[in-house]
Amino acid sequence: MNERRLGNLLFGREEIEERVEEVAKNISLEYENKRPVLVAILKGAVYFAVDLTRNLEIPFDLDFLALSGFKPGLLRVEIEKDTDIDLKEREVLIVEDIVDTGLTLNFLTRELEKRFPKGVKVCTFLNCPARRIVEVPVHYCCFEIPDVYVVGYGLDFQGDFRNLLEVYTLYDPSGRSTQILKQMGKGGKK
Ligand code: IMP
């Protein structure tokens, strides 16, 4: 049943592996001798955080933070599970699955600034600038994507598809995302 709800392939395993390795190399260079705290946002960023940290060549600490989604009528999210590590005077690197509207990250960076870290930067697996509502700085990004809903590699649709090793669009009866992907030279079937 799940198979039928998937659309087109956007990023395959090898492509993801290679890109995550590259980004990890850049992070290792920037944070040498700085022992950053990587704060992975539950649940979507877990898969990315595991692969990213496996490729790091520097000492680091890993922590997790969970946020509620945007509740109807409330223009903010809430922290549901906070970090265990004290972030004061630490170099913090937020690890996200996707920066879409930017609202979540905007809230989060503001919250973390109140804890007086030495620095706060953002590393996201996917970035979707076309859907941005709030401008947020993104320092490391594996892939930029157009305005399509994607699943796999930690990203879910109603809890499904997180464990896929590749990234797909959802089944697309209108042909909209298929067309967008075609323009990028992407869009093989599963
Ligand atoms: P925001 O819109 O930048 O605040 O994104 C908030 C969260 O929405 C992300 O961390 C994801 O968990 C989720 N999200 C946004 N776009 C997608 C998508 O295309 N697929 C799956 N989850 C998404």
Image (tube, rainbow, N blue to C red):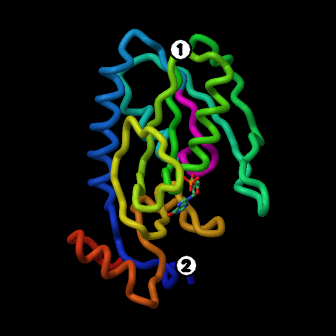
Residue 117: x percent and y percent? Answer: 58, 17
Residue plotted at (68% across, 23% down) = 114
Q: Amino acid at mark 2?
A: Asn
Q: Please state the quadrant of the image where ligand 1 appears.
A: bottom right
141 relative position to 184: left or right? right
Residue plotted at (67% across, 20% down) = 115
64 relative position to 147: left or right? right
* Image disc number at residue 118: 1
Does 3 lie within the magenta span? Answer: no
* Image disc number at residue 162: none
Q: Amino acid at mark 1?
A: Lys
84 relative to 42, above or below: above
Depth-wise, is mark 1 or mark 2 nearer the camera? Answer: 1
92 relative to 153, above or below: above
Residue 27: x percent and y percent? Answer: 35, 27
Residue plotted at (41% across, 52% down) = 127
Range of the magenta residues? Answer: 38-46
| Residue at mark 2 | 2
Q: Quadrant of the C terminus?
A: bottom left
Question: Which comes before the other along the chain, label 1 or label 2?
Answer: 2
The crowd level at tag 2 (other Cα within 10 Å; few <14, some 14-19, many 20+) is few
18 relative to 39, above or below: below
